[in-house]
Image (spheres, coloured by chain):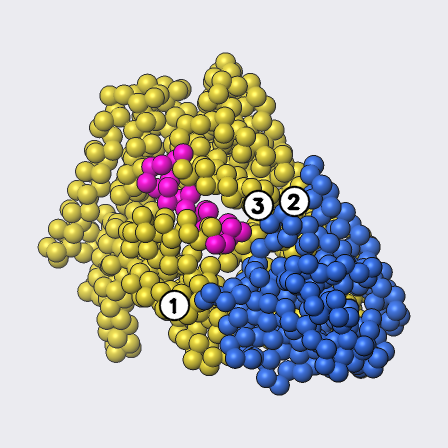
Chain colours: A yellow, B blue
Amino acid sequence: MAQQTPYSDKRFLILDDQAEMRSSLRSQVGSLGCEQVTTAASVRDALQKLSVSSVDVILCDFYLGGGTDGQQFLEYLRTRRIIGRGVLFIMVTAEKGYESVVTAAECLPDDYLLKPFTADTLRQRLERLLERKRRLARIDQFQDAGNWSGTVSACDEIIAARDRYLVDALRIKGNALVQSRQVDTAIAFYRQVLSMRSLPWAKLGLARALQQQGGADAAKQLLAELITEAPKLTAAYDLLGKLHQDSGDSDAAIEILDKACLVSPNSLARQRSIAAVAEQKGDFARVEQALGQVIRKTRHSPLRETADFARLGNAYCEIGEAGKAVGLLEEARATGKDAAADPLLAAVEAIAQRKAGNAEKAAAALERALQADPAALTDDAALNLARACLLAGRQDSAQSILRRLVQGNPEAKQLHARITAVLRDNGAPELAEQLVADSIREIVQLNNEAVRRAKAGDVAAAGEMLCEAAHRLPTNLQIMANAALVVYLDILRNGLDSEKLRSAQGFQQAVQAQQPDHPKLAEIASLVEQIRSKYARSE
Amino acid sequence: MQFVDLAALTVHGVKNRLAILAARAEARGDRETLRDALEAAATLSRLLACYKAEKGQLAADIGACTPVDLVGELVAEVRQQTALTISADLERAPELWFYDEHLIRMVVRDAIYNALRYARRQVVIGARTRAGWLDFGVCDDGPGYPPQVLARAAGSWPLSREGTGLGLYLADCVAALHCNNGRCGRVELANTSGAAFHLLLPE
């Protein structure tokens, strides 16, 4: 009879680039009575296996060869939500210290296992970690679902029990308070934790909460202190860099991100942030340096991102290397999965081809870029597409893209400045002054008109106007929230309509996901409650 | 490439070989080979850590840890490698304490390997609270520390061929990295029924 252990029914994935290590690990896991073991030799191989069937435990070697490492793999899995928090990720490494940099808590492995280890040590560690997962399972589910109030109350239960998971629960609770923007509660909570002991994660959390409160200077000071105390906590450098960037000090932002690179030279995420800061600052040589590294490491790996190619191509154009840009962008289009349909890549290629003197190829690339659904464009894609249109003399298309971008983000002053700069620098200075203000006026008028009609009793007409705008501008939360409100009101007054109900729910969920503390959500929830009791009664 | 990077890569390669060797030995119940492989790996870790300590690069990543698990794992690991009686003394161990799990594991493991060399019949590994301190103890029933080791001034350990001095030097470095509220960790040695090694970490 098969041995029954807490882990014998678990599915394992072993990732190691060395065949001997894979088979050694496999037999160690096998000796514990685990039969569902898959092995992978590369990140590509592992991702393919994860797409076929899910696993419970991942044992991943830190060194994976070919410029990739286990930390990059883990960050990729977590940020793309390929694995939930319930999956145990164990990093196998020869030496802790070189590779174990403390990134965002989200992207930390559950544990490090130092080679060599015996099957017996592996067994004990697995038992302990699986017990921890079980104890935190409800919290993990709430976190995966973005249910922060549920997370907080589940944490409170564990905190009250004061067992060995106390500190885990404190850490997760703090994060949940920050995520749900309960700023004052979060600050008081972290101060209380810190009064017991100076813990790096609590200082980092306090800095986040202070930032949310608008105390950027206090947050910066705290982070500078934290970096001295815990120089390996790269998440602190990242946050400090972002704060400098937000206050317009890109030199300080780059300086701090450079320091973080010394601590963790292999982080792709950090090179990408450096590139983003340098791009806004107009330092394209620096963009080239940072993204050049990223592309060298990811070119033949599944960790590659089409946006890196597009941004590097753009940097080449900016430093007068249009020919190089064309080569890179054509390579990206030919070799990347789904890259041919990527609007950012196509827009940048249109610009590069034009600068390189290939008018026909430029026109073809622009056509490809314009195929994309305008409501789904990222800010970068929209800005570059507008540039490409302006360079091709298609001012009307450029205007309509930019107008939509403003109306989708009416509060984003930095984005507005970039939009103005695109118009000014690409032959439309007369529009630069007008477009942002006009677009905002237009959407405010639409909103006011819809509200007026709703108040006058014509909720159906108001709902139609707002729904049209909400579909067009999915990032404008004021429009989205008003659309949800008015459509629910229409349902409450004029009767249940499944299509209207679906669209109102869609708007409500989108607002909830993008800004859980949006002021209109409470009003929306109370309307939903009224609808529920009204139609429940009439059934 | 700097020497330290080359060393790290080499250590990685050698540890991979040792891991395969250890797994094979464990699978066929070969206690001596298992111990040689694991002890050799521990020696390499110690060497790298000493290098980092000397360069001022040894840093503690202090978090909430469970001493009972640390001692439990080490006891189980060592039992597979020796015919001596290895026991755990965890009656007065706290649920949680703050320290760097990997550095402390390395120091306690080194103390255990040292004890294995001198013990006659048994080694006791324990964790207990003692007036605001956590005390990791490794006690054997051997001849005890020689007088020149007991009379040492911290940081100036006499180096022996087995590397005992190196282990104690590292234990001092690691202890000193664990400070809270103005108190820092320390190492205490004594001869009781044999050699008694204590690593004390402040609350």
Q: Disc 3 or 1, which lies upstream in sequence?
A: 1
Q: Disc 3 or 2, which lies upstream in sequence?
A: 2
Drawn side of residue A297 relative to residue B111, left or right? left
Query: Label 2, on which residue?
Result: A68
* Nearer the camera: disc 1 or disc 2: 1
Q: Which residues are magenta?
A: A229-251
* Nearer the camera: disc 3 or disc 1: 1
Q: Quadrant of residue A520?
A: bottom left
* Nearer the camera: disc 3 or disc 2: 3
Query: Label 1, on which residue?
Result: A195
Residue A128 image position (x, y, % from top left)? 63, 73
Contact, mark 3 vs mark 2 (Cβ under 8 Å): no
Judged from this view, the residue extending furthest toward the left is A456
Residue B18 image position (x, y, % from top left)? 82, 58
Q: Is residue B149 above or below residue A404?
A: below
Disc number for residue A264: 3
Most prominent secondary structure in the magenta stretch? helix
Drawn side of residue B91 relative to residue B98, left or right? right
Give me the residue at 26% from left, 26% from top: A432
Q: Amino acid at mark 3?
A: Ser
- Residue nearest the viewer, comparing A26 with B173: B173
Q: Amino acid at mark 1?
A: Ser
Residue A5 image position (x, y, % from top left)? 71, 78
Q: Disc 1 or 2, which lies upstream in sequence?
A: 2
State how far apart marks 3 and 2 are (Cα): 13 Å
Q: Quadrant of the N terminus of chain A?
A: bottom right
Drawn side of residue A251 relative to residue B91, left or right? left
| A468 magenta-colored | no
Query: Crowding near pointer 3: few (<14 within 10 Å), some, many (20+)?
Result: many
- Residue nearest the viewer, comparing A271 with B133: B133
Q: Amino acid at mark 2?
A: Thr
